[in-house]
Amino acid sequence: MGMSGVGKTSLVKYYLTNEINLNHEQSLGCNLISLNVQYGETNYQLLVMDALADSDLNLSCRLRSIQNTEILAIVFDLGNEETWNDVRKKIKIIKDNFYSHNNLILVGNKSDVEVKIEDSVVKQLIDECQDYKIEYFKVSAKTGENVNKIFTRSLELGYYFSKLRWDKIKIILFAYKYSLPVEDNMSMSWINLCEALPNMLKKKRKSCYSLSLLPSEIMKRLIVYV
């Protein structure tokens, strides 16, 4: 997310093509892009939502994406003080809309031009922000400096948070399964316990309770993690 013109789409396109696009037009709305990211010897799929510009922030579908994402990146223009001053506003929007993790990625783009936002200023904001652990990358969508690092780190954090969430879900399900009387426990299969999860992931609302074999108190605990 970030103000229009900071280079959010350009960063994604550089990662995809490893080429500079000098004729790039301003993005409109919100696009979901699938990226193949190699980590070690394994290729992973990273879904990137591009972009949350100011014109999008009043739309509920854009704000819901903040709640559902595994990792958020705020992009600003190193040569434009207005975009830097906007970063605090973006952090408040994230907090107000219940972003569920405590890690953020802060991206200072256009390091190839005259830099007006010094590292010391960025460090001061990071030190002042107690709600999130912020990692900072200074990049250029024109030269490619550190562009790959953004997406690799996003993959690392996204994978960690996703695994952590599913581990918590499994713990709750196992605890419920083995709290049942033996005769009920033996007849309750793992598939039955988990079949409600796809509906939870899609709806995230109380209406999905009726689709599940699990008691509502268990669903209420699970839905926090999906």
Image (spheres, grey):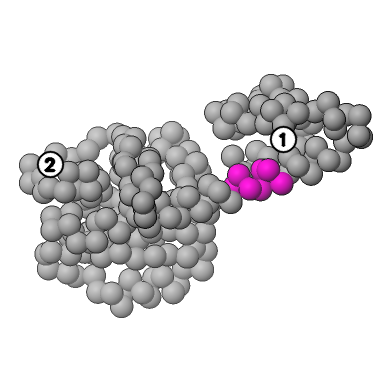
- Specify the quadrant that holds the C terminus: top right
Residue 166 sits inside the magenta stretch: yes
Q: Can you tell which quarter of the image residue 55 is in?
A: top left
- Given residues 150 and 95, the one toward you in this image is 150
Residue type at mark 2: give it: His
Residue 106, percent across and down? 35, 60
Count of numbered circles in the view? 2
Principal secondary structure, stretch drawn in magenta:
helix
Which quadrant would residue 61 be assigned to in this image? Answer: top left
96 vs 153, left or right, is right
Q: Residue at x 23, y 48 (%)?
A: 15
Residue 165: mark: none
Q: Residue lying farthest bottom?
A: 120
In the rendered image, the vertical position of residue 142 relative to residue 117, given as above or below: above
Using the image, determine if residue 225 lies above or below residue 32.
Answer: below
| Image point (25%, 35%), residue name | 28
Identify which residue, 160 or 52, lies in the foreground: 160
- The residue under label 2 is 24
Q: Secondary structure at mark 2?
A: loop
Span highlighted in magenta in the image: 165-171
Work out which residue is located at the far front of the displayed protein and give it.
41
| Side of 11 where 216 appears, left or right | right
Secondary structure category for the residue under label 1: helix
Mark seen at residue 219: 1
Sequence-wise, which precedes: disc 1 or disc 2?
A: 2
Task: Calculate the distance from the C-alpha at mark 1 to the C-alpha at mark 2.
Answer: 46 Å
- The x and y percentages for residue 198 are 59, 28
- The amino acid beneath tag 1 is Met
